[in-house]
């Protein structure tokens, strides 16, 4: 799983040559399992996109056996893909149970969430996540980093 999510450890950015193949694997993982269709006209809810899950046969080769299930959740703010991992899947040698990809259709912002098993040694994972100074044309220079929630055993990158 490191090859998919290591960019999150670098201030949630993963910029530079070392991360290019990691980003490529992550994007392939997302693109092969999650689908978006633009509708010809808005549906009854006013949505112009329809989100779905690709058939298991189309999931990224090599990752399909690691994934137990994918589900979609929608709420007021986000469309969320929840990928449940099979038993025994690990990140940094700790049991990881789920990856959540949250985004706002037709807008900016979202989150990438790694959820670990309750028995995971989170300090052994969290110590690899670094803060990175970055800049944004509206916000200026700021520190960017993942957030660790001890109660939920999650590490989240908000964008």
Image: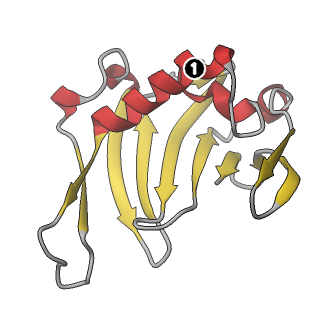
Instruction: Write down the quadrant of residue 30 in the picture.
Output: top left
Residue positioned 33% across, 52% down in the render? 71
Across and down, in percent, residue 124 comes to 82, 25
Tally of numbered tags: 1
- In the picture, the quarter occupied by the N terminus is top right
Query: Seen in the image, is 99 located left or right of residue 155?
Result: left
Question: Is 65 located above or below residue 5 in the figure?
Answer: above
Which of 71 and 95 lies nearest the eye of the viewer? 71
Which of 114 and 43 lies nearest the eye of the viewer? 43
Instruction: Write down the quadrant of residue 72 in the picture.
Output: bottom left
Query: Seen in the image, is 53 located left or right of residue 73?
Result: left
Residue positioned 17% across, 79% down in the render? 43
Across and down, in percent, residue 125 comes to 77, 28
**Residue placed farthest to the left in the image?**
40
Residue 8 in view here = yes
- Mark 1: give few (<14), some (14-19) or many (20+) Cα within 10 Å: few
Query: Seen in the image, is 43 located left or right of residue 9?
Result: left
The secondary structure type at the circle numbered 1 is helix
How is the structure coloured here? secondary structure
Residue 150 in view here = no
Question: Is 6 located above or below residue 55 in the figure?
Answer: above
**Residue placed farthest to the front in the image?**
137
Residue positioned 43% across, 58% down in the render? 80
User: On the image, numbered disc 1 is attached to which residue?
Assistant: 20
Question: Is 14 located above or below residue 108 in the figure?
Answer: above
Question: Is 147 located above or below residue 25 in the figure?
Answer: below
Across and down, in percent, residue 45 comes to 25, 84
């Amino acid at each position: 799983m490191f090859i998919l999510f290591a960019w999150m450890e670098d201030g949630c950015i993963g910029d530079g040559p070392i991360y290019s193949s990691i980003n490529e694997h992550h994007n392939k993982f997302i693109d092969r399992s999650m689908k978006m269709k633009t509708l010809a006209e808005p549906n009854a809810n006013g949505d112009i996109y329809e989100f779905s899950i690709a058939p298991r046969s189309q999931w990224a080769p090599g990752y399909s056996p690691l994934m137990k299930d994918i589900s979609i959740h929608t709420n007021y703010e986000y469309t969320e893909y929840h990928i449940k991992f099979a038993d025994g899947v690990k990140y940094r040698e700790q049991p990881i149970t789920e990856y959540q990809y949250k985004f706002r259709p037709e807008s900016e912002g979202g989150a990438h969430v790694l959820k670990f098993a309750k028995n995971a040694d989170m300090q052994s994972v969290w110590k690899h996540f670094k803060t990175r100074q970055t800049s944004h044309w509206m916000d200026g220079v700021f520190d960017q980093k993942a957030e660790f929630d001890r109660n939920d055993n999650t590490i989240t990158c908000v964008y």
